[in-house]
Amino acid sequence: MHELGIVFHVIKTIEQVGEEQHLQNVASVTLEVGQVSGVIPHELESCWDWAVKRTELMPTASLKVETIPAVTHCNGCGQEYATVPQGRVCPHCGSEHTWLLRGSEVSIKEIEAR
């Protein structure tokens, strides 16, 4: 379950930001999670609920998850397309010379403090 590792990393990062910004309490955190990141949102939320209760800065902080759609770029024709319905083969030209432009990331978008 890599979701727990992600949650621990996010909490550590928020605690560092909290110290730098002199935050007293975090109310919510918004994460951007790529559509093909391999992260299972309900598992992430379950791990979050368990882990934040053990922190001083955010024991009741809620987690908001926003999905970033996966988009692939084709080097063959220069087009971009939705990754999930098409996969690695470009639907415009049939090229397999493609690469994932976005959709695999997990990042902190917003920290709401009380």
Image (cartoon, grey):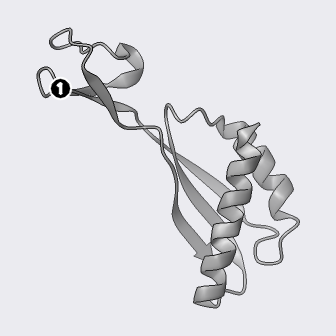
Q: Is residue 114 visible?
A: no
User: Where does label 1 land, which residue?
Assistant: 75
Is 20 or 29 nearer to us in this picture?
20
Look at 82% across and 69% down and name the residue there.
Answer: 59
Total number of numbered discs in the rendering: 1
| Image side of residue 85 versus residue 16, left or right | left
Look at 58% across and 88% down and name the residue there.
Answer: 21
Q: Name the secondary structure under disc 1.
A: loop
Determine crowd level at label 1: few under 14, some 14-19, many 20+ residues with C-alpha closer than 10 A: some
What is the x, y in percent for residue 109?
Answer: 49, 61
Q: Is residue 49 above or below residue 21?
A: above
Is 7 or 59 nearer to us in this picture?
7
In this view, the residue farthest toward the bottom is 22
| Image side of residue 29 versus residue 72, left or right | right
Look at 80% across and 67% down and name the residue there.
Answer: 60
- Quarter of the image with the N terminus is top right
What is the x, y in percent for residue 16?
Answer: 65, 77
In this view, the residue farthest toward the top is 94
What is the x, y in percent for residue 82?
Answer: 32, 25
| Image side of residue 90 versus residue 13, left or right | left
Q: Is residue 33 above or below residue 83?
A: below
What is the x, y in percent for residue 37?
Answer: 53, 36
Q: Is residue 9 above or below residue 70?
A: below
What kind of residue is marked 1? Asn
Quarter where residue 83 is shown: top left
